[in-house]
Image (cartoon, rainbow, N blue to C red):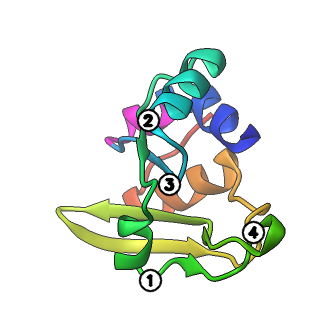
Amino acid sequence: MSELQGLQSRIKNFRASGFQLIAISPDTVEENSRVARKMKLDFPILSDGDLTVTKALGLLHEKGGMGGHDVPRPATFLIENGVITWRDLTDNWRVRIQADELLEVVQQQAGLAFN
């Protein structure tokens, strides 16, 4: 969850570049709401409890979680006008792209500079 805090810490940079942050989690709506409140996140966490979105995007990591449970592969997408223009995927559910790394990608994609 530290990746969510990292994204929150740079949310002004993302918004200034015209990008909107949205997280998707397999947790329940209630759990996602609790996490968002606790971490004071200023972006939504959508619930994919039945992994419908995960499966539709081809991100299911079968038996990849603790105890051999199916989990979503960590993934980050940049979507512009409904088209995926960049993505970062990993098979390790503990690995996430860091906010500064994502901002570098945004900078490259949009030709912007961040402090």
* Residue at mark 2 to residue at mark 3: CA–CA distance: 32 Å
Dot 2 or dot 3: first in sequence order is 2
Q: Can you tell which of label 2 and label 3 is closer to the viewer?
A: 2
The residue under label 3 is: 107
Q: Return the residue at label 2.
A: 29
First in sequence, mark 1 or 3: give its number: 1
Q: Secondary structure at mark 3?
A: helix
Q: Mark 2 and mark 3 in contact? Answer it, CB < 8 Å.
A: no
Instruction: Work out whether residue 93 or residue 6 is closer to the camera in this orientation and state it.
Output: 93
Q: Quadrant of residue 55?
A: bottom left
Cβ–Cβ under 8 Å for marks 2 and 4: no
Q: Residues within 10 Å of mark 2 (few under 14, many from 20)?
A: some
- Residue 14 among magenta residues: yes
Residue 89 lies, with reference to residue 38, above or below; the image says below
Q: Position of residue 35 (x, y in %)?
A: 61, 27
Type of residue at label 1?
Answer: Gly
Amino acid at the residue labelled 2? Val
